[in-house]
Amino acid sequence: MTVTAPMGAPAHPAPDGALTVAAGQAEAVPGDVPGNAATVARLVRQATARGATVVVLPELFLPAYHPPTLADPLTDVAADDAGLVDDARLEPLRSAARDGSAVVVVGAAVRHPDGRRTCSALVVDRAGTVTAGYDKQHLCGPYEKELFTPGVRGATLTVDGWRLGLGICYDGCFPEHGRAAAADGAHAYLCPSGYERGSEHRRDLYYPARALDNGMYVVFANPVGGATRWWFNGGAAVYDPQGRPLVRAADEGEAVVVTVCDPAELVRVRTAHSMLADRLPHQGASRASIAG
């Protein structure tokens, strides 16, 4: 497993083999990092028992997406200069990844050595090593902008020959973000998210659209339940390269959905629907003005 920053490279060939992925949803307890890590570990074990080798959990799940509680620095995990996270509260999660030989992506609040605090996707590899793999670039609304510093670059995770672009929630609302992942050769796009009740229409539109835009799989994870006014609407799903749901959880209740990403389908769709290959290098850079 490797995590790299996208450099605008051309699309990579399809992987040689299939990849079994999972998306999970559960209720996180505000401020309870060790308890939420135990919940993640339980979901990971459910996913790996069903064959998953990549498991995606929601945005900020370790501290819970609850802005009043997120103001407490005890909800952070600390990363060193290399992005490594060594926090004893995450040991159940490390053990689940090791035992299941899985790579896990889950949301956390991360404190960096230079003082930055980011809304990040942690990547736990098959050896149980935890890395701050990606920092959310598009912060959503006043709470996030007050609590966090935006990330400055994308990231691509490589597992078993599959290139997996990383995004977090609001990032996926921007076509350019998914496109940047695809331009870096992503075969799939992993999106830990935090969609609140009432946002079902947008939740169910953005992520299939990113799949269809780029002919790639999309794995979407979202919490359920919540506290105070932050209530979440589940709908964890995996979309195929044409934006069709392969599996999808309900809007309520804990769940893990598991499916197989097929490289032959990736090739078939990208051959039949060649938007990636046909896109213009300077779309819209030169425009004519027409009087009506």
Image: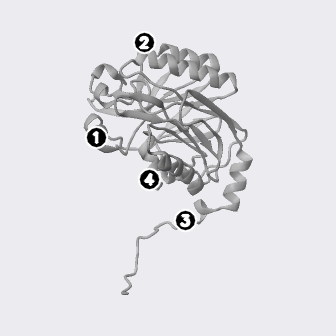
Where residue 64 sits: x, y (%)?
40, 26
Neighbor class of circle 2 (other Cα within 10 Å; few <14, some 14-19, many 20+) is: few
The residue pinned by badge 1 equals 145
Measured Cα–Cα span from mark 4 to mark 3: 17 Å
> What residue is rendered at 66% in x and 29% in y?
52
Furthest-bottom residue in view? Answer: 292
> What residue is rendered at 70% in x and 61% in y?
272
For the C terminus, the quadrant is bottom left
Q: Secondary structure at mark 3?
A: loop
Asked whether, in this view, residue 84 is left or right of residue 104, the answer is left
Measured Cα–Cα span from mark 1 to mark 3: 33 Å
**Mark 1 / mark 3, whichever is N-terminal:** 1
Instruction: Name the foreground residue: 24 vs 14.
Output: 24
The residue pinned by badge 4 equals 174
Where residue 161 sits: x, y (%)?
64, 38
Neighbor class of circle 1 (other Cα within 10 Å; few <14, some 14-19, many 20+) is: few
Do tag 3 and tag 2 residues touch (Cβ < 8 Å)? no
Q: Is residue 168 above or below residue 227?
A: below
The residue pinned by badge 3 equals 279
Asked whether, in this view, residue 193 is left or right of residue 257, the answer is left
Mark 4: which amino acid? Phe
Residue 292 in view of the camera: yes
> What residue is rendered at 59% in x and 55% in y?
212
Measured Cα–Cα span from mark 4 to mark 1: 17 Å
Q: Which mark is residue 88?
A: 2
Mark 1: which amino acid? Lys
Q: Secondary structure at mark 2?
A: helix
Q: Is residue 137 above or below residue 71?
A: below
For the N terminus, the quadrant is top right
Where residue 171 sits: x, y (%)?
43, 46
